[in-house]
Amino acid sequence: MCLARAVAAVACRRHWSELASSCRLRQTAAMTERFERHRQPWTPAEIQKLHQLAGKGASLAAICKALTRSEESVKIRAKLDKLLITKKR
């Protein structure tokens, strides 16, 4: 009986370790997709587009999507350039 329990426990541990490995791989893939542009410097073209979109009164979400940048990144850059991004109410 003890041998059967030991075999079952080993099989269970192997199954859980395989599940954990696949979860880690999926999380890593999701993180790399999400942070592809992490801490990348702003190009002059991106800055020009930010100025243009902010001047037209585009929302923060629209600017972020157009520039493929995070909201925080766009907010910081807009503050550095003294730009006003309108808030949609």
Image (cartoon, rainbow, N blue to C red):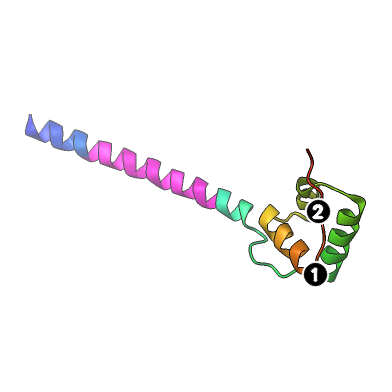
Rendered residue at 84%/70% (across/down): 44
Q: CA distance from mark 1 to mark 2?
A: 19 Å
Residue 23: % across, % down = 45, 44
The region drawn magenta spans: 10-29
Element carrying mark 2: loop
Residue type marked 2: Ile
User: Dot 2, crowdedness within 10 Å: few (<14), some or many (≥20)?
Assistant: many
Please name the predominant secondary structure of the magenta segment in the image: helix
User: Dot 1, crowdedness within 10 Å: few (<14), some or many (≥20)?
Assistant: few
Residue type marked 1: Thr
The C terminus lies in quadrant: top right
Q: Is residue 6 magenta?
A: no
The N terminus lies in quadrant: top left
Residue 41: % across, % down = 72, 70
Left or right: residue 15 compared with residue 76:
left
Rendered residue at 77%/62% (across/down): 78
Determine which residue is flagged by label 1.
43
Residue 80: % across, % down = 75, 68
**Of the image marks 1 and 2, the number of the one nearer the N terminus:** 1
In which image quadrant can residue 84 be found?
bottom right
